[in-house]
Image (tube, rainbow, N blue to C red):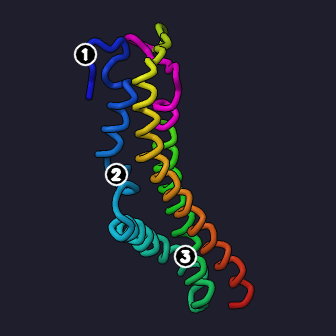
Amino acid sequence: MVDPSHPIPAEQQPLRQYAELREAFPFSWPALEWIPYLKRIFAVWGVVVLAVSPLVWGSFAGDWGHFVSGSVLGANALLSLVLLHLYLGWAYVRRRLVQARIPYEESGWYDGAIYAKSDEELAQHRLIVHYQIDPMLQRLRRSLWAVAGLSGLMALLWPLW
């Protein structure tokens, strides 16, 4: 995957960044099938609900409707941050892959350069983006919208409790 004759240092090569992110925890989750992906997302959500519930109980002890709504809203806020972190990581790698010219640092922040990809390299990178990364970003967007929708529902129900 890493081309030693490539002028870009190995850790900054877009294909290597893609491969590393695809194997990294939790960035590998969006590449999973739907059920394993949802299991992980719900597990994170459940752990966060358990973590924020004592704080919410301190504010709404005995008021079960507000306690449940507050716990869900708190968990959704933190889950949104996790999903946003995943989205931004994949969006960065996507941008590096689709760009025809990519900046890199040869040995430090003070000696940056720009590498122009060959047509073949650019075509390969764009295929990876189209078939691998874009579906993951779409899944993450849908997940964020679902969390936002659930949060909106909880906010609408808040006055009814």
Q: Nearer the viewer, mark 1 or mark 3?
A: 1
Q: Is 86 contained in the magenta span?
A: no
Q: Residue at x 60, y 81 (%)?
A: 69
Tags 1 and 3 in contact by the CB under 8 Å rule? Answer: no
Q: On the rendered image, what quadrant is the N terminus found in?
A: top left
The disc placed on residue 72 is 3
Which is more toward the observer, 23 or 130?
130
Quote the CA–CA distance across marks 1 and 3: 50 Å
Mark 3 closeness class: few <14, some 14–19, many ≥20 residues within 10 Å: many
x, y percent for residue 27: 38, 49
- Please tell me whether mark 2 or mark 1 is closer to you in this view: 1
Looking at the image, which is closer to me, 64 or 124? 124
Residue with the mark numbered 2: 28
Q: Which residue is mark 1?
A: 4
Residue found at x 72% / y 80% = 156
Q: Which residues are magenta?
A: 93-108
**Dot 2 surroundings within 10 Å: few (below 14), some, or many (20 or more)?**
some
Vertical arrangement, residue 90 with respect to residue 97, above or below:
below
User: Where residue 62 sits: x, y (%)?
Assistant: 57, 92
In this picture, residue 157 sits left or right of residue 117 = right
